[in-house]
Each structure stands twice: as C-alpha cells, then as structure tokens.
Amino acid sequence: MNEWQSNMTGIIDAHVHMGPSSDEAHVLDILKAVGLEKMGLVSIQNPAEGAGLPQSLYMKARHPGTFYVFAGLNHGQQISEGRVNTPSLVKQLESFKAMGCDGIKMIEGKPTSRQVMDIPVTDRYFADYWARVEELDMPIVWHVNDPEEFWQPELLPAWAREKGWGYSDEDVQKETLYAEVDEILDRHPNLRIIFAHFYFLSADLDRAARFFDAHPRAHFDLTPGIEMLYNMSHDPDTTREFFLKYADRIVFGTDIAGRNTVDESIYRAGIVFRWLESDDTFRVPEGVDFLLGKPEDGVIRGLSLPDDVLTKIYRVNYTRLAGTEPRPLNIAQAIAECTRIGSIAQGISNVPAEDTEAVRVARALEKLV
C-alpha cells in the first residue's frame, strides 16, 4: 500500500472511537501506523450495553499520556422511562471531571440521537448541565446535524442509507438544530466547543465564517464526512483563505474507529493529511472504509497549507482546549463509574452486569490499583 503520510510531528487525532477494550493492541497499532502522537477518544455511552466510556477509561489507565478521554452522558433513566436511576447530568459531569476525563463528548444534536431521546438541548433537562459545563470550563466535542443530503432521499449516499441516516419531514430539521445551538451559545458564551465534522457547514463557508465571528470560542474539527472534502474542493482558493484566516479555530480529526483495519485507518488519515498538506488533485483510494464511499464519488483538491497553520490544526488548537497532556485517571473512581454503568445496563436490558464491557473494564482496572 502506498498512501500519504504526514511530514509533521506531534499530531493529535481529536476524534477517535474506541472499540471494546480487547482492541487495545489494535488501536495502538493504528496510532503508530498513522503517525500519531496522541488520540482523543470520544466516548458515546450506550446505556443499554454498558459500553462506550469504560473502554476509553481503560486506555487512559493503561497508557497514561497517550489518550485523552471525552466522556459521553448517560441518559439511561430517560431512555428506560424511569426503570433505572442515573445521576443528574451535573453529577455525571462533576464525576467525569474528578475522575480525570479531559472533556465531554456530545451526540445530542445528531438526528438519530433525537429519534432515541426527543429532548432538545434547550430543554430544562439540560439547563443545569450547560451552566455547570461553563463553570467548570470543560471542553466539548459535539456532533450537531448531518450532511444536508441526508434530508434529500434522491441525494442520500448508499452508505448513509444502509446506516439509517436518511431523514424525513417527521424528523428534526437541520435549521432547528442550528437554532438550538445558537440559543445555547447565546446563554453560555464561555462554552468551549469543538463542533465535529466542520459543523456540516462545508458547503457554506460564508455561513461558517459568520458563525466563527459570532462565537469566538467555537471550533470545528475536520473529521470526514467525505462530503466535507468534496464541498471544500469546489473552490480550493476560497477554502485556503478560510483556513488561513481561522487557523486558530480548526482541529484535526479522522473519525477512526476500532472497527477500522490498520490499512483503512492509514487511508482515512492520509486523505486528510494529503488534502491539508499538498496541492494534489485526487480521489479517495481503493481500500478506504465503507463510510468514505468509492473513488469515483468526487474530486479532492489539496490546500497546501503552511507548516505554522498545520501545527495549529494538528496539535496546538486541541491542546489549548484539552491540555498539553491528558489528565491522569483516578483509577478508583473509574472502577466505581464502570461498576455503576454496568448496573444501569443490567437494569435496562437484563444483561448480567458481569457480561458488560463496563464491568470487564472495572475488573481489569482493579488489577492496576
């Protein structure tokens, strides 16, 4: 295989999804093969399975200094209609902070999440949470919206259709989700947020610029959504000007997941590296993972950004938000958290707690104490 490797050092991938803790060696292989120094594990909780956050805590405990953890919220009480009790969102947030998590991951803003729990982020359910996040000054990686074609059946990519990511008039609409974010940022202007996937504004850089100007603490990450690269390749000169102007607001990410092979991970990161660093015109290569589509889907035109801008995107902007080093994990508190997550899963789905990823991680962490 012959795919683009970055010439830059100290790269932090701000957007990685950890699989089960048994993927430990595989994820380390990906980190090395891609040429990363650190990873930010964005950890969406699955309350019914007792998974999502525990395996990220495991990696932080096992490899101090290598993995940042952004913890997702557990809405088990809501989705189970009260069959289980979960701590308030504020209590969860404070526990994450005390435990040594580096930030918060939010999926509450993706339309599929709204299908599961139809509570707007502007609802009083979230009110105390937003205030406390702002007080604690914890950074957030937040997925809000999806590509505009997901609401247009005739334009919906096959891979998105297979994932169930096509929406109708009965689903929450894109502008509704953007309006909710604006309301939250107006209420809490000191929030520090990285909006994943370029906030799905890659087709409208004028709007992206207005958003940055209105919200000076907002950032975008570059996780593809391959449509992001296609959209911004229509006019690479204008895109390059945007990146130079807002170089302090853009964060590198790949959306690599534990399910990806090492080769798929190299391809996924390499596409973004090549787009940022070269002036090449190219297509996605054969061998990319399913979510990036096929080579004939579109043309990508490189931005050839200068090294000082690349350094900001690859490292500096993220460490300004999340810290120059990942916070150390309080293992005892992590064990307690994982045990609680396992109990919640058992209460929702009747799976024995001992069979959940959460309790498996708790048992592994006990050996580190």
Image: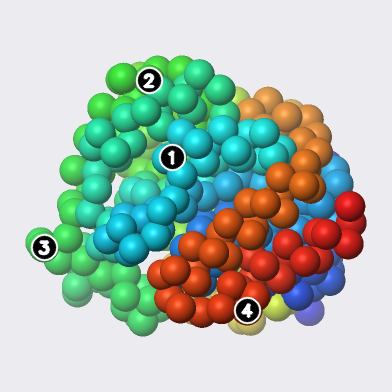
Real-space Cα separation, disc 3 to disc 4, in angstroms: 37 Å
Q: Secondary structure at mark 1?
A: helix
Real-space Cα separation, disc 3 to disc 2, in angstroms: 30 Å
Measuring from the top left, give residue 317's x and y in whole percent.
65, 30
Mark 2 and mark 1 lie on one chain; the one further toward the N terminus is 1
**Numbered tag placed on residue 89 in the rendering:** 1
Mark 3 and mark 2 lie on one chain; the one further toward the N terminus is 3
**Numbered tag placed on residue 170 in the rendering:** 3
Residue 128 versus residue 143 in the image, above or below: above
Marks 4 and 2: CB-CB under 8 Å? no
Residue type pointed to by label 4: Asp
> What residue does disc 2 label?
188
Task: Name which residue lies at 58% across and 47% down.
Answer: 71
Mark 4 and mark 2 lie on one chain; the one further toward the N terminus is 2
Check disc 1: other Cα within 10 Å, few if <14, some if 14-19, many if 20+. Answer: some
Task: Name which residue lies at 63% across and 51% down.
Answer: 337
Measuring from the top left, give residue 213's x and y in whole percent.
39, 19
Residue 161 versus residue 196 in the image, above or below: below
Task: Name which residue lies at 29% across and 38% down.
Answer: 125
Task: Name which residue lies at 52% across and 41% down.
Answer: 92
